Image (spheres, coloured by chain):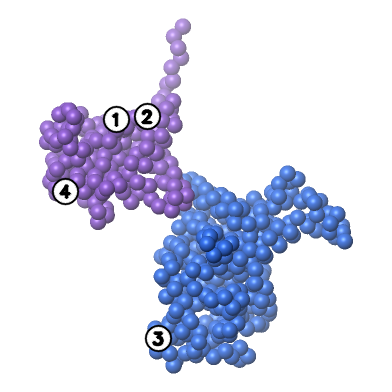
Chain colours: A blue, B purple
Amino acid sequence: MFRNQYDTDVTTWSPAGRLFQVEYAMEAVKQGSAAIGLRSKSHVVLACVNKSSSELSSHQKKIFKVDDHIGVAISGLTADGRVLSRHMRNECINYFYSYESQLPVGRLVVQLADKAQVCTQRSWKRPYGVGLLVGGLDESGAHLYYNCPSGNYFEYQAFAIGSSVTGCKDILRAQDALFALRETLQGEKLTSSTCTIAVVGVGEAFHVLDQETVQALINEFEIAGEEAPADEAAAPDQAGDSESGATAADQLLQWTIPQQPHLSLQEPVNWPRTLLLHACFHGFLGTKKRAALVLHCKAPSINRERQPEE
Amino acid sequence: MTKQQANWSPYDNNGGTCVAVAGTDYCVIAADTRMSSGYNILTRDYSKIIQLADKSVLASSGFQADVRALQKVLAAKHLQYQHQHNKQMSCPAMAQLLSNTLYYKRFFPYYAFNVLGGLDHEGKGCVFTYDAVGSYERVGYSSQGSGSTLITPFLDNQLKSPSPLLLPARDAVTPLSESEAIDLVKTCFASATERDIYTGDKLEILVLNASGLRREYMELRKD
């Protein structure tokens, strides 16, 4: 009831101490098409669903290269995302001009968050309607951050934003949970034209994978996905596809239980690049395939707000 | 009452010579590596050449602090271009950008004498030569810096066809082969080193062609 009285201005508080305009902006993020990010010690993978307004139109660009070592995937108002990406690019260029070294991801994210905060405290502005998954590599390792329209940011091991990801996030948030990335494309076929994937890692500048590479990965992945047992209850995370002789099997067989059974922010698991990419696909997979991949881990505080180290 | 004069200058001349020669499918860009100030040598191993894009290489003599600043500005602008257009800048585009950047500081110029070399849209070699405030022209070959007065007449003589003295220039580029052009450039510097005190130590040569970029070095007299 009160919501309607206090939601006109971003500079008006509600009696409950909320800024509804900011919350509405976060709602816009939830309405956007999905974007997923995962990271390991040495790589970060960003993936997003390509949604186009009609069959005849092209899809919007949702993954942007910000610098050789940083990329961003957005969900929400793509125009806002484009503008923020341009700002981030300029920040990286200016930093390099002054210091001849790459802008650490944590600093970029703070600057972005401060910029977003300004829009929550000016009556003539509105909050940015876009959530950004910022993935990058710097001296302190690989990082994945999520920037909110509210001006908050969090560091994540893995995160998903946009529509149809609530199942995904709930599972991520659960303590002692079997960590499973679930469907976002509700039954839609996963092909290289419906998703975009980008990678950044040690010795690998940020780049978007081209259609052929993505399709090849999907093919491998689907072969393995079919064979793997859909046993979530007591799933050890060994690849269950020794029957399939495909090369996919070899890659999946590399997925031994991580040395540390915990997925903590301090010690990200040393996942090989392919593992991350496959995990991404699981995020997209429909229920029909019964997302077989299950990464067994404790995820005690995956949503913890984290201050970047200076 | 005479006008008050400054008792210091914001500029210094660090000497050095740059040369570029354009061929049918290659471009040779060369510069010595000596950096001096007055009668002193500051270092024998300073590179005046930078690769700005896939197909653009800039060599600049003059005041190296301004040269370095100019290189950084161009590199940053190129990165912005790549983000916007999803591709590298072509050499003619870079040539125009350099001209605009220089003229932007028309009333406090970059003390840099530039030669831009690269490959154009057809893969042919191209060389652009500049003055300190951005006036530029596409030529078949060029020399800038302290040894330019010694080298240019020699190049005019040797590279007759692209020479503008034989008006109009019959060829835009030299018909020489890549190795012949490199030898010619080496000869130029060897001669300039003999008579110009600011040129010497080592010669850095960059060759741009369809297969990419190649670097070569040659020792020069150190006196």
Residue beneath disc 2: B133
3D distance between C-alphas at marks 1 and 3 = 70 Å
| Residues marked 4 and 2, same chain | yes
Front position in the image: A81 or A137: A81
Residue A262, located in which quarter of the rendered image?
Answer: bottom right
Q: Is B162 on the left or on the right of A21, as rendered?
A: left
Q: Earlier in the sequence, mark 2 or mark 1?
A: 1
Residue B178 tag number: 4
Residue beneath disc 1: B38
User: Circle 2: is it few (<14), some (14-19), or many (20+) Cα within 10 Å?
Assistant: many
Residue beneath disc 3: A246
Residue A241: % across, % down: 47, 90
- What secondary structure is found at the residue carrying circle 3? loop
- What secondary structure is found at the residue carrying circle 4? helix
Residue B166: % across, % down: 15, 29
Residue B189, located in which quarter of the rendered image?
Answer: top left
Q: Earlier in the sequence, mark 1 or mark 4?
A: 1
Chain of the residue on which disc 2 is drawn: B
Q: Is residue A266 visible?
A: no
3D distance between C-alphas at marks 3 and 2 = 63 Å
